[in-house]
Image (cartoon, rainbow, N blue to C red):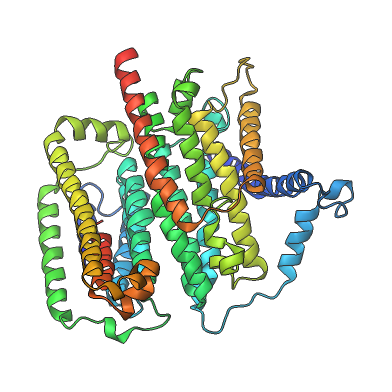
Amino acid sequence: MNDVLDVALRLLVVFVVFLTFPLLVGQTEHKVMAHMQGRLGPMYAGGFHGWAQLIADGVKFAQKEDVVPAGADRRIFQLAPAVALLPYLLVLLAIPIGPGEGAVGQVLDAGVFFVLAVMGVGVLGSLMAGWASANKFSLLGGLRTAAQLLAYELPMLLTAASVAMAAGTVSLVGILDAFEWWWLPWQITGALVFFVAGLAELQRPPFDMPVADSEIIFGAYTEYTGLRFALFLLAEYAGIVVLCGLTTVLFLGGWHGPWGADGLGWVWTLLKTAVLAFVVIWLRVTYPRLREDQLQKLSWTLLVPLSLAQIALTGIVKVVFL
Amino acid sequence: MTPAATAGSLVGTMNLAAESPGFLSPTGVEIAFLLVGLVTFGAAVVTVTTRQLVHAALWLVVALGGLAVEYLLLTAEFIAWVQVLIYVGSVVVLLLFGLMLTRAPIGRSPDADSGNRWVALAVAVAAAAALVWVVVDAFRTTWIDLDGAPAGSTDVTGASLFQHWVLPFEALSVLLLAALVGAIVLSRKAKAAAAGGGTATPPAAPPPTAAPPAGGRTSGPGASGTTDAGRDTEGTR
């Protein structure tokens, strides 16, 4: 009975994190973008600095009519948002936020493979949406999504493999246990490549070609309305949380902190994740969108060679110096 | 065809395996294995029988995902996640990409049927029978101890792969490297041929370079050669 309670509690915590953190990131994005652009952003909903804006948005989305285009493939059209969103929930289960087995949803032996594999599945949702909408812009968005995934999955995997080589394990908990502070300069190239490739996989600006609104309206999500559209948006912000959490765990030492405060490991994890999420928003405000060919070129001629070089460096340091 | 055969073999193994230690009282894991096997088998059958191309690709996701769950139930966690990563995350995405790039109508595509349905069925049944027979014969008395240390953890898999199976592993990597080099050579040769065609007929040259997709369909054997080779490369990868 105790085990059942334990599992239920862990699932509940992960679910609550899954529901609240993306909203926090979304609200931060509203406010940070506004202040960077010399505006105020949402100020009315909820009273204090518009804190309830996203809740109000959610209520609005829920009230809207759920339209399925006449020419669409109904079932796949309706299934797509779930396929896009659920993988991120599963990934959150495997990310450790503190030391020990108490601070992770589920300890997995092959954690790195699990998170990367399941994150890749999320893109199927966009593909399904793009195809099933019976809309040329949606189809183009789906195509761009697929091309982008194929290009950026490889550098992500290679840099994650570099960390796994350094730690000698593919378990996320094990990687954190093996972490030393000097891994930071050692793996810095890998960290940058991983983060950039992750941004591209999430289709965040400056890599948002698949949803480029000035060219293809809103890509694969053009035909979606109401709650289903909100689910796609939620998937994007859940993706930011997952990507920042993963970068923190793999490259920034997760719960390790400079002053080794016991029992406060989770604060470090959350702090690093929050800083990375801020960087994600910052990049959106700062850089213009890449063109499709520039996007592919960046991956194949810059990120892939860099990640291969990182793997070579990791191997050399591991064999010669350790 | 292959997923169907594999699923069939898995189901077959299960039926026989359940007979040895506890035929009358199968454990929860065994029942789950059997049920997931049935789902996988069903999805595989739908994959090859459905008349909607994209639906076939999506049912393939279900079949491959079911196989991953079966690996998990057999304690091979590493293999399971690699299965999801490579097949669901990459191969199916590539497949969908190819479909959407060429032709993926919503609804039925009656011209997508090949004429040799019965030959395909015979090959599938023969392959399934051979696999079931060999696997059952090989693992008749093998039993995975679920309470002990996992027999398929990353540690164990890595050790056996790089100690006992390192030669086949290297042979496979050379094979993949050869395929990779071949794909690059094919795509580069096509580009050179297109450039040659362009210089031979100067008036036809500007359209393909200015707008490759449009030029490929309307004019120039060189330009259409480029698109064909591009498709070849997709297939090789």
Q: Quadrant of residue A303?
A: top left
Residue extending furthest toward the bottom: B110
Which of these two is toward me, A13 or A187?
Answer: A187
Q: Position of residue A264 (x, y in %)?
A: 65, 23
Whether residue B27 is visible = no
Q: Residue at 90% across / 50% down in the picture? A: A47
Occupied quadrant, residue A225: bottom right
Which residue is more in the foreground, B65 or B94? B94
Judge left or right: residue A295 versus residue B67.
right
Between A213 and A106, the residue placed more toward the observer is A213
Residue A223 visible in the displayed image: yes
| Relative to B64, residue A30 above or below | above
Rendered location of residue B46, percent (x, y): 32, 73
The outermost residue toward the front is B202
Q: Residue at x 76, y 56 (%)?
A: A55
In the image, what residue occupies the spot 85% across and 55% down? A45
Is A232 positioned to the left or the right of B12 in the image? Answer: right
Q: Position of residue B206 (x, y in %)?
A: 35, 70
Q: Quadrant of the C terminus of chain A?
A: top left
Q: Is residue B109 above or below residue B30?
A: below
